[in-house]
Image (cartoon, helix red, strand yellow):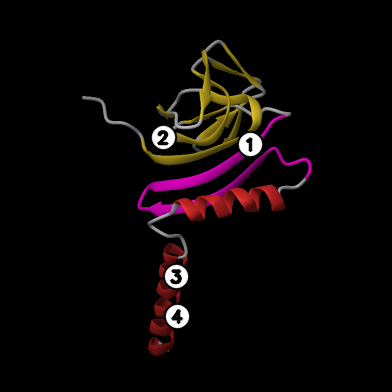
Amino acid sequence: MRLASLLLLAGAAALLAADQSALPAFVSAADVAKLIQRANTERKPDQINFTQRLSNHGTYRATFESRKAGKATNPNIHETDTELVYVVDGAGMFTLGGTLKDEKRTNEANRSGSGINGGNKRHIAKGDFFIVPEGIAHAFTDVEGTLVIISVHGPKGIDK
């Protein structure tokens, strides 16, 4: 019985390790190009945002996102994560701040809405980088063609 328990624990640990190693620590430009191609071929006709997890390390999560023009994705607030965003390709509008319209809780750490009242709206394009502090409403809208970003979620900032 004890041997069976040890084998079960070893198997569970191996599965967890395999799951962590399934995502690379390094993502090349060629890898990102393949993700863009995948988004173009696998996106469903009514799918506005195509996402793919890139990498994990501890509490940090990197995600590839490809948004198509036509309909804005819902704005949201990440209550416990700071989000760093790099625009790989494309352009659109980004709103930071304000309050969510028709706010609803999506999970224990995030809220979403149908739009944003107020906030600072600015045009973003390839090569731009910005930080979204935890607890701040934000939204991508008015996408021009396809907007491709890499976002990294990590622990909230530290006040000094």
Specify the quadrant of the image occupied by residue 81.
Answer: top left
Q: Quadrant of residue 153?
A: top left
Q: Is residue 76 above or below residue 149?
A: above
Which residue type does callout 2 highlight? Answer: Leu
Could you tell which of marks 3 and 4 lies nearer the N-terminus? 4
Q: Which residue is mark 1?
A: 67
Q: Is label 1 or label 3 in front? A: 1
Residue 84 shows which numbered tag?
Answer: 2
Q: CA distance from mark 3 to mark 4?
A: 15 Å
Kindly identify which numbered label has been placed on residue 8: 4
Secondary structure at numbered mark 4:
helix
* Residue at the left extreme of this rendering: 160
Q: Which residue in the structure is indicated by mark 3? A: 18
Q: Between disc 1 and disc 4, whose residue precedes? A: 4
> Measured from the top left, where is residue 40 in percent x and y?
68, 47
Q: Is residue 128 left or right of residue 105?
A: left
Q: Earlier in the sequence, mark 1 or mark 3?
A: 3
Q: Nearer the viewer, residue 59 or 7?
A: 59
Q: Quadrant of the N terminus?
A: bottom left
Viewer-nearest of discs 3 and 2: 2
Q: Position of residue 72 (x, y in %)?
A: 67, 27
Quick one: label 4, few (<14), some, or many (20+) residues within 10 Å?
few
> What residue type is disc 1 on?
Arg
